[in-house]
Amino acid sequence: MSSLKNRSLQPAEGNLPVQWHFTLGAALFLMAPFDLLASMGMDIYLPVVPHMTEALQTNPAVVQLTLSLYMTLLGTGQLIFGPLSDKVGRRPVLLGGAFLFSAASAGLALTGSANLFLVLRLLQAAGAAAMLVATFATVRDVYAERPESAVIYSLFGSMLAFVPALAPLLGSLLDIQFGWRSIFWLLAACGALACIHAAIRWPETRPIRHHDGEPKPWRKLQSILTNRPFWTYTTGFSTAMGAFFVYFSTSPRLLMDKLGLSSVTFSLCFASVAIVMVIFARFAGNYTKWWGLRGTLRRGVLLIMTGGILLFFAGWIAELNLIVFILIMWLVAAGIALTCSVTANGALKAFGAYAGMATAIYYCIESLVVSIGGTIAVLLLGGDTVLPLVAYCIISALLTLALTLGQKD
């Protein structure tokens, strides 16, 4: 671990105006809250959605918009804040986003107007999008050529797996004890604390650039969208996160409705998959040393595809068994951790000068592929069978493997 401490490295391109002098643990403690809060803004709110029609004196369609518009803006908003972070810096976009998220959350806790609630949800999502893109652009700035990047990216992906599992439970407990407004007060408080911490300790990391030779925005976009490694690793990221999304969407019906698990047992089984992801993520730095970026990506998606094949035989050909299902999902979780450990680095590697824009497009494409592809799989193949997960894991993994052919790290 000593090799990870207190190193001052320059990013792949340009010079940092301020050096980043954090150990791996300190860097994660500084950055992780922004990653987690962006997701919690959606998931912790889910348990109270059925009550919001009465609380806001509105109709179910408006309440549904508070969910769907948050998700939409969380993805598309990064297309605005990514290029902005390239222009003005990561730090102001991060702090502005955190302030906006915290202020909007406090407003949500105070309002009783449906229209104002919807507007504040949009502002909350915009703040979350800014926090996400600034955080991941900073990781690209600082850790692009360092083994810690694999650990950070993989741990971020694994931590996000805990949010859908635990945040709704937390939201439900808060609602029971203190009412639905306490959910948004908690988000506001956590956002404010993370913002204050970052204001004190987060230095600017955007590489200093000479604007004379800087390409036009459309040239930057063209260079990103025509870069084959960008598409290869973005597709790999979509494979990993989509596999978890489909698992998240189908597992309640599979395990509780079909196999009769209680909500507590289901939660423990669900959480065990996320724990496996965290365990494998912790050692992600070793994978890239052994296999390189492409080798790690291929092994990760092969594990995901193998899991899909095994699920087909275990859940479709034979009768679904809980222990077998969970063991196979642990295999898929290991594949997700391996894949996520290298996808961001591989996709963003060539774009140090405008990492914010590249990061925004990377996450926007992934969110669109996962939400559209995963939803189609569940709707067409049924949310109470293993077939959606089987189809998504195998097809997306094969596509990623095809794209890796002929490429080098």
Image (spheres, rainbow, N blue to C red):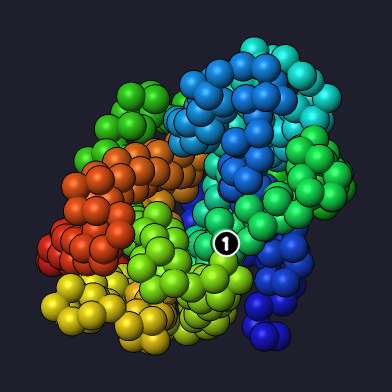
Up the image or down, 276 lies above or below 200; here it is below
The quarter of the displayed image where residue 396 is located: bottom left
Residue 195, position in %: x, y?
Answer: 80, 43
**Percent x, y of residue 299:** 28, 78
Which is nearer the eye, 285 or 319?
Answer: 319
State whether residue 320 is above or below residue 388.
Answer: below
* Mark 1 burial class by Cα count in 10 Å: few <14, some 14-19, many 20+: some
| 301 lies above or below 165 | below
Query: Residue at left 81%, top 40%?
Result: 179
Q: Amino acid type of disc 1?
A: Ala
Asked if residue 263 can be seen in this view, the reply is yes
- The x and y percentages for residue 238 are 33, 54
Of residues 50 and 75, the one nearer the viewer is: 50
Q: Quadrant of the C terminus?
A: bottom left
Q: Residue at x 18, y 73 (%)?
A: 316
**Apparent side of residue 207 relative to residue 175 in the rendered image (left or right):** left
Secondary structure category for the residue under label 1: helix
Quarter of the image with the N terminus is bottom right
The quadrant where residue 372 appears: top left
Q: Is residue 3 left or right of residue 241?
A: right
Which residue is identified by label 1? 165
Residue 102 visible at all: no
**Horizontally, is 52 left or right of 149 in the view?**
right
Left/right placement of residue 182 relative to residue 34 reads right
Residue at (72% x, 15% y) in the render: 113
Instruction: From the top left corner, tell me how far across and down residue 325 is, in percent.
Output: 35, 79
Residue at the image position 27 percent from the left and 51 percent from the top: 378
In the image, 257 versus 316, the foreground residue is 257
Marker count (numbered): 1
